[in-house]
Image (cartoon, grey):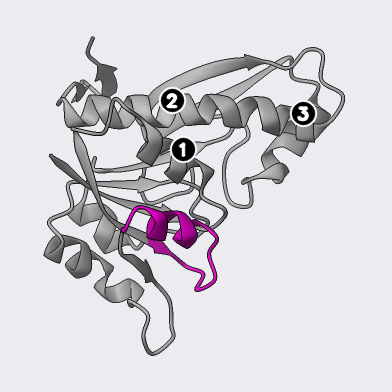
Amino acid sequence: MLKVAVFVSGRGSNLRAILNSSKLTKLINVKAVISNKAACQAFKIAEEYSISNFVVGQEENDISYNHLSEFLKSLEIDLVVLAGFLKMIPKDMITNFRNRIINIHPALLPSFGGKGMYGINVHKAVYNSSAQVSGVTVHFVDESYDTGKIIAQRCVDISDVDSPEEIAERVLSVEHELLPYVIQKFALSKIIVDNGRVKVLP
């Protein structure tokens, strides 16, 4: 089974989508849920599924960012999933887990990405641009915000929306489909990097 660590900062709806996915039940083992917030709402979901949760930060009982790679290696983690994690990943962790860290972004990269572009900030920017479509991107994580190779994308029609919140709602439902799909492909070894492009095999 693919050993997975899920990093979260918010309520954890993508974490729940992963854990509820019938296609992933026999393919992955979520070994840890990690957050930068001690009071992270997603920890309640982890507890429902008897998954250990950990805080990464500066407090005495937290995991240090400097020791994050070692900690993940001690759990024998195969894939790191950023599911609404709002902090930059340490460079040594990106080196040690190259092409094994993925992030979900609530827009169609490379548009509407970068520092500060998360959550409703993204949807406000999309709305104010008068874009007629938005969507979801799952990509590899590299040393910069939202610039890693794109693995998969799904489009969402937003031509009739009246608010950024409507965009957020439509995009979130697609996030809950696309992220488990990509994790499934990882578990089946059907994601390859070839000639600088990512291919998802059928």
x, y percentage for residue 100? 24, 43
Q: Which residue is mark 3?
A: 166
Q: Which residue is nearer to you in this view: 116 or 155?
A: 155
90 vs 192: above or below: below
Q: CA distance from mark 3 to mark 2?
A: 19 Å
Residue 27 part of the magenta-drawn span = no
x, y percentage for residue 58? 43, 83
Image quadrant for the C terminus?
A: top left
165 horizontally vs 33: left or right: right
Residue 41 part of the magenta-drawn span = yes
Question: Which span of residues is magenta-colored?
Answer: 34-50
Q: Amino acid at mark 2?
A: Leu
Assess disc 3: are there few (<14), some (14-19) or many (≥20) residues with their C-alpha within 10 Å of its C-alpha: some
Q: CA distance from mark 2 to mark 1?
A: 9 Å
Question: Quick one: label 3 or label 2, which is nearer the N terminus?
Answer: 3
User: Residue at point 31% right, 58% down?
Assistant: 51
Q: Which residue is mark 2?
A: 178
Assess disc 2: are there few (<14), some (14-19) or many (≥20) residues with their C-alpha within 10 Å of its C-alpha: many
Question: Quick one: label 2 or label 1, which is nearer the N terminus?
Answer: 1
Q: Amino acid at mark 1?
A: Ile
Mark whose residue sits in front, 1 or 3? 3
32 horizontally vs 86: left or right: left
Question: Quick one: label 1 or label 3, which is nearer the N terminus?
Answer: 1
User: Secondary structure beneath disc 3?
Assistant: helix
Q: Which residue is mark 1?
A: 104
User: Residue at point 39% right, 72% down?
Assistant: 56
42 vs 174: above or below: below
Query: Which residue appears farthest toward the bottom when viewing the image?
Result: 60
User: Residue at point 63% right, 52% down?
Assistant: 116
36 vs 189: above or below: below
Q: Quadrant of residue 132?
A: top right
User: Residue at point 39% right, 36% down?
Assistant: 20
